[in-house]
Image (cartoon, rainbow, N blue to C red):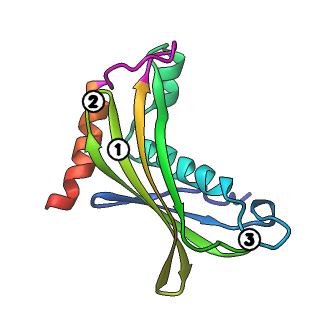
Amino acid sequence: MILPSLPDGTLDRDRHLYAVRVYYEDTDLSGITYHANYLRWFERARSDLLRQLEIDQRAAIEAGEGAYAVSEINLKYLRPAKLDDDVLIETRCTELKAASCRMHQLAFRLAGEERELLAEAHLRVGFVSPEGRPKRQPEEWRAAFARFAEQGDQ
């Protein structure tokens, strides 16, 4: 039996790229993507970024260490994604602190070599204890984010 490949993003210097397709379930009756789906796509891209950086958030949760949580987000919608569109999510780390990082995410419609900006998000994610209190990120995780963010300086 041949299995399809799993969805995977890729690291490209200081940005993470993750592709999604607009399915019928993502749209409203007019065929336009429902606004909350951008939040889901951005979350999937960030989760994949953690995987690409070899950050095992599941193990940290199971060990009772904590997890990342979005503490603030500003989302701007520019154009609608429509049924069957191919969408590329681009994620960058713009600021890294002991317990949090700020990220910038863009959603582009892909049409051949053309990219059209659909939405963008500026957000802050913080590492929190199982009780929901902010705490320092594990040092190796912070180092992985630092290496990722510094790739753009080279």
> Split into 4 quadrants, where in the image is the N terminus?
bottom right
Closer-to-camera residue (42/16) = 42
Query: According to the image, label 2 marks what residue?
Result: 140
Q: Residue furthest right?
A: 29
Residue sitting at 53 percent across and 87 percent down?
A: 112
| First-in-chain label (2 vs 1) | 1
Could you tell me residue 52's position as x and y percent?
41, 47
Give amino acid for label 2. Glu
Query: According to the image, label 3 marks what residue?
Result: 32
Give amino acid for label 1. Arg
Residue sitting at 32 percent across and 32 percent down?
A: 141
Query: According to the image, label 1 marks what residue?
Result: 102
| Disc 1 and disc 3 in contact, CB within 8 angstroms | no
Range of magenta residues: 128-138
Closer-to-camera residue (53/91) = 91
103 relative position to 120: left or right:
left
44 relative position to 4: left or right:
left
Q: Quadrant of residue 19?
A: bottom right
Q: Is residue 44 above or below residue 21?
A: above
Q: Is residue 148 above or below residue 83?
A: above
Residue sitting at 48 percent across and 14 percent down?
A: 63
| Disc 2 and disc 1 in contact, CB within 8 angstroms | no
Could you tell me residue 77's position as x and y percent?
56, 65
> Predominant secondary structure in magenta?
loop
